[in-house]
């Protein structure tokens, strides 16, 4: 399972430029994931390649960001150039089978306005940018799940079918609805909807509460990455 490519494909930047084995991604500055360099290899002239990336983002008025996995040479070169390490992230994988959700879960193949508002109210770390975020989400086929109360989504998630695995994204629960098992039901509904042999998700290293939930559903940490930004 090449998680770097899976995440890249499931959260697609709407502008992409290839430079050797690197993909320079831009999506209006919304999320680092879609606005960072995906370095699939280490080029022979690493300094020159970094310079190309820096020019790419500078021309768009953005800071240069790299997604760094198991690439110690790249990581060291970026650190030497003054790039800060931010947002260490873990990758968790789990089985495709899942028990029945404990709550009724609505699942659609497009995000509806209330779903978007609920997700963005929790995960909208970028202020404006909901239109760009919706464009990223709908860039590939996906399912959108929510536990609703009086028509209001309280917990939401997004599932992206990718061959024999399912990528789980956009897991968010309104603060007033937490500790009710709603996120668990959303996760189960997405995994069941996917019907794949496995599933994966990513979450920040610091989000131990989310990791505990995912472990209780059979997910385990299988790797990780971080970002370098300057």
Image (tube, rainbow, N blue to C red):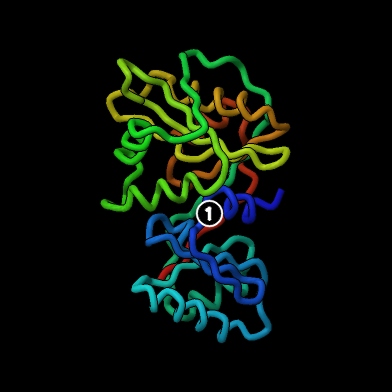
Q: Secondary structure at mark 1?
A: loop
From the viewer's perspective, tell me whether residue 213 is left or right of residue 223: left
- Pinpoint residue 207: horizontal percent, then vertical percent: 43, 41
Q: 69 or 142, which lies in front?
A: 142
Residue 90 seen from this side: no
At which x and y percent is residue 15? Answer: 49, 64
Q: Residue at x 73, y 38 (%)?
A: 164
The vertical placement of 37 against 102, above or below, is below
What percent of the width, then of the height, locates residue 61? 34, 73
| Position in image of residue 16 (x %, y %) | 53, 66
Location of residue 69 (image quadrant): bottom right
Which residue is rendered at x = 34% and y = 34% of the image? 113
- Mark 1 is surrounded, within 10 Å at the Cα level, by few (under 14), some (14 to 19) or many (20 or more) other residues, namely many
Q: Is residue 181 above or below residue 33?
A: above
Q: Is residue 100 visible?
A: yes
Q: Quadrant of residue 217?
A: top right
Could you tell me which residue is drawn at 52 percent across and 82 percent down?
Answer: 52
Residue occupying the point 56% across, 26% down: 216
Q: Which residue is mark 1?
A: 12
Q: How many marks?
A: 1
**Quadrant containing the C terminus in the rendered view:** bottom left
Front residue of 155 and 213: 155
Residue nearest the viewer, comparing 38 with 202: 38
């Amino acid at each position: 399972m090449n998680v770097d490519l899976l995440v890249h494909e499931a959260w697609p930047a709407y502008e992409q430029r290839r430079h050797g084995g690197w993909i320079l991604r831009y999506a209006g500055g919304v999320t680092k994931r879609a606005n960072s360099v995906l370095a699939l290899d280490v080029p022979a002239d690493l300094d020159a390649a970094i310079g190309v990336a820096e020019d790419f983002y500078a021309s768009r008025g953005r800071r240069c960001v790299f997604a760094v996995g198991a690439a110690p040479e790249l990581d060291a070169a970026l650190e030497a150039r003054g790039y800060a390490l931010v947002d260490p992230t873990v990758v968790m994988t789990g089985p495709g089978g899942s028990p029945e959700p404990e709550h009724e879960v609505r699942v659609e193949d497009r995000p509806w306005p209330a779903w978007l508002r609920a997700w963005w109210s929790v995960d909208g770390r970028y202020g404006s940018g909901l239109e760009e975020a919706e464009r990223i989400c709908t860039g590939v086929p996906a399912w959108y799940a929510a536990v609703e109360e009086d028509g209001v989504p309280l917990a939401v998630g997004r599932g992206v079918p990718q061959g024999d695995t399912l990528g789980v994204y956009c897991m968010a629960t309104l603060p007033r609805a937490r500790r009710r098992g709603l996120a668990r039901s959303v996760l189960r509904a997405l995994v069941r909807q996917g019907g794949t042999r496995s599933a994966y998700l990513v979450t920040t290293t610091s989000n131990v509460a989310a990791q505990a939930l995912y472990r209780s559903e059979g997910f385990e940490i299988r790797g990780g990455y971080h970002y370098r930004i300057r």
